[in-house]
Amino acid sequence: MRIIFLALLACGALLADDASKDIKIDQLLKLLHAETIQDQIYVQLGQQIDRATLGLAQQAGIPPADQRTATADLQEKMTASMKENLTWEKLKPAVMQAYRDSFSDTELDTILAFYNSSTGQAYLTKAPLIAGKSREAAEAKVRELGGMFNVMGKDWSDKHPKPAAPAK
């Protein structure tokens, strides 16, 4: 009987710890404005939907001038489905679980303390600007690399001319 009682106490403590951890994770997600993840997904997936529907129109042989009009209904349905299925309310449980699995209670306390500090608040304010500048720098390097690749490809093509077509 005593073992059962101790087991029940341990289960109750674990549930309380989980509830406490969930409260902390929820606080952290609010500080991080994690709900904006859906907006980022909408932008990225919206671009993919646009490319996919135009690709379908192209495969169907629809002239380029008519492709957007021809795929408008499909694009509208796909976008509506995306917005219905990728809401923050539907994403949040998986995000909560990822934080639950990744951080201990003590780590969450420390992370919350940081983000609630003036330095943490400054980081939250400046991080998007830093990310934007970093992305721009990376994109510039990729463009530069693309130019180098074009030159390398041309050099290779010049050294390896197409074989002449066989005489008939």
Image (tube, grey):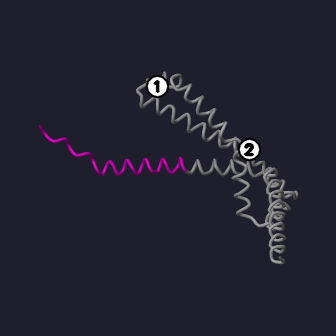
Q: Residue at x 64, y 32 (%)?
A: 80
Is 156 within the magenta?
yes
The dominant secondary structure in magenta is helix
Q: Amino acid at mark 1?
A: Pro
Looking at the rendering, which quadrant does residue 117 occupy? bottom right
Gap in Å between the C-alphas at discs 2 and 1? 38 Å
Whether residue 167 is situated above or below residue 98 in the rendered picture: above
Residue 144 is tagged as: none
Q: Residue furthest front?
A: 1
**Image location of residue 128, percent across then percent down:** 73, 48
Along the polypeptide, which appears first: circle 2 or circle 1? 1
Of 4 and 91, which appears nearest the observer?
4
Helix or strand or loop: what does disc 2 sit on? helix
Residue 89 is tagged as: 2
Circle 1 packing at 10 Å, graded few (<14), some (14-19), many (20+), is few
Whether residue 157 is situated above or below residue 61 in the rendered picture: below
Residue 64 is tagged as: 1
Q: Which residues are magenta?
A: 142-168
Locate residue 152 relative to residue 76 in the image: left or right.
Answer: left
**Image location of residue 48, percent across then percent down:** 56, 39
Locate residue 26 relative to residue 53 in the image: left or right.
Answer: right
Of 101 and 50, which appears nearest the observer?
101
Whether residue 13 is situated above or below residue 75 in the rendered picture: below
